Amino acid sequence: MSADADEMEMTPLSVVRAEPVAQDIQLFELRRPGGGDLPAFAPGAHVCVRAPNGLVRKYSLCNDPAERDRYLIAVKRETAGHGGSASMADDVKAGCTLPVSAPRNDFPLVASPAGYILIAGGIGITPILSMARHLKATGGRFKLYYLTRSPETTAFRDELSAPQFRGVVTIHHDGGDPDKALDLWPVLEKPRGHVYCCGPRPLMDAVRDMTGHWSSAAVHFEAFQEAVKSTTEDRGFKVRIKSSGASVDVPVGTSILEALRAAGSNVPFSCESGTCGSCKTKLVAGDVDHRDLVLAEHEKAANIMVCVSRARSGDIEIEL
C-alpha cells in the first residue's frame, strides 16, 4: 500500500532482523536504536515506512500488540509495482535504519463475545496474524482461514501449523487454480460474531458475496493493494451537494474528498485509498466510476467513496 508522507512525522528505527519467511516475502523486525518502548498499537494497525529509494509504503504490523519493544512487518516483493517493495526486499538488511511513522489503524478489531472468523489471502495474512496472536494470547475465540497458492508462498506457515494454533487455523493451497479454492460458504452461511478479511480483490469479492445476509457492521475488509486513484482518462467535473445546492469543482488530479474539504465540508475520512469505508457518502445522482475496494455491487447505486471514485461522465450529486 502506498501513502502520502508530505506531513507525516517519522522516527528512525533500526532493522535488527531481515529474513525471508516465504517465497518473495521478507520479514523485518524494527526497534528503537537505543532500545525502549515503541508507540502502542492494536490488532489491524499499520505503519508507514520510507524505503531506501524514497518511496513511502504502508505495512501492517503482524506481531502481538502486547510486544511494545518491536514492530514486525512482512513485505512481498511486487515485480509489477512502483519499486517500494523491491527496494525494501533488495536494499534493507539487518543494521539498516528506516524512517517509520507511528501506528494507525483503519482495520480495528472490535469486541465480539461471539468470536471471530479471520480470512487471509496471501500477504493479507499480516494484519490477520496480529489479530490471531492477540486473540490467542488473550483467550479470544476465533477461526483463521489462510488461503495461498502453495506451501512455498505461505508466510508464517510453521508458526500457524504449530500445536498452539491446532484446531483454529486452516491453511489451504489452491495451486493458482480457482476451481481448487477453499469453499468458505459452510463457514459463512450462518452469521455469528465478526468476519475480518484481508487479501486480493477476488477473495474479498467472494467473501462479500457470501456475507450479504450478515449485518454490514459485522463484516470488515482491508485490501493489501490500493484502489485505482487516477487514470489517463480522468476528467474534471462538478459535485453538487443536494441539501445546500452548493457546487464544487473537482479538477483532474484532485479527489472529491480533497475538493470538498478545501471548500469547507467536514467529510469523515481515514485511509484515503478506497479500502477502509470511512468516507462512504450518499450518492443522489450521476454516472460514477467506482474505484474503491469497499462497496458491494448492490451498494454502488446509492453510495460513493469520495476518496477515490470519480464521475464517469457528466457531474454527480451527493448528500453530506
Image (tube, grey):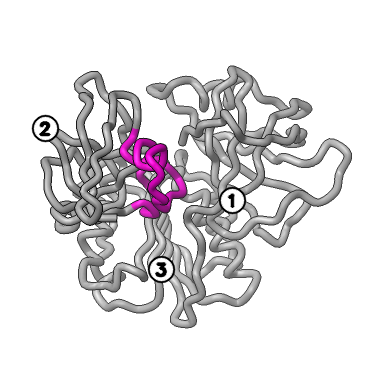
Q: Return the disc, 2 or 1, that comes first in the chain's sequence.
A: 1
Q: Could you give the CA–CA distance between mark 3 and mark 1, rounded to whole angstroms?
A: 17 Å
**Residue 315 x/y as whole percent:** 15, 37
Please tell me how crowded label 3 is: few (under 14), some (14-19), or many (20+) other residues with Cα within 10 Å.
some
Tell me, for residue 28, which label it has, or none: none
- Of residue 65 and residue 249, the one placed in the foreground of this image is 249
SS under mark 3: strand
Residue on which the image places disc 3? 117
Q: Could you give the CA–CA distance between mark 2 and mark 1, rounded to whole angstroms?
A: 42 Å
Disc 2 + disc 1, Cβ < 8 Å = no
**Residue 252 x/y as whole percent:** 29, 24
Q: Is residue 298 above or below residue 87?
A: below
Magenta span: predominant SS is loop
Tell me, for residue 62, which label it has, or none: 1
Counting the numbered discs, the total is 3
Please tell me how crowded label 2 is: few (under 14), some (14-19), or many (20+) other residues with Cα within 10 Å.
some
Q: Mark 1 belongs to which amino acid?
A: Cys
Over which residues does the magenta segment extend? 255-279
Please tell me how crowded label 1 is: few (under 14), some (14-19), or many (20+) other residues with Cα within 10 Å.
many
> Can you say which quadrant of the picture contains the C terminus?
bottom left
Residue furthest right as drawn:
34
Determine if the magenta segment contains residue 115: no
Q: Mark 2 belongs to which amino acid?
A: Ser
- Of residue 230 and residue 208, the one placed in the foreground of this image is 230
Residue on which the image places disc 2? 313
Q: Return the disc, 3 or 1, that comes first in the chain's sequence.
A: 1
Q: Mark 3 belongs to which amino acid?
A: Ile
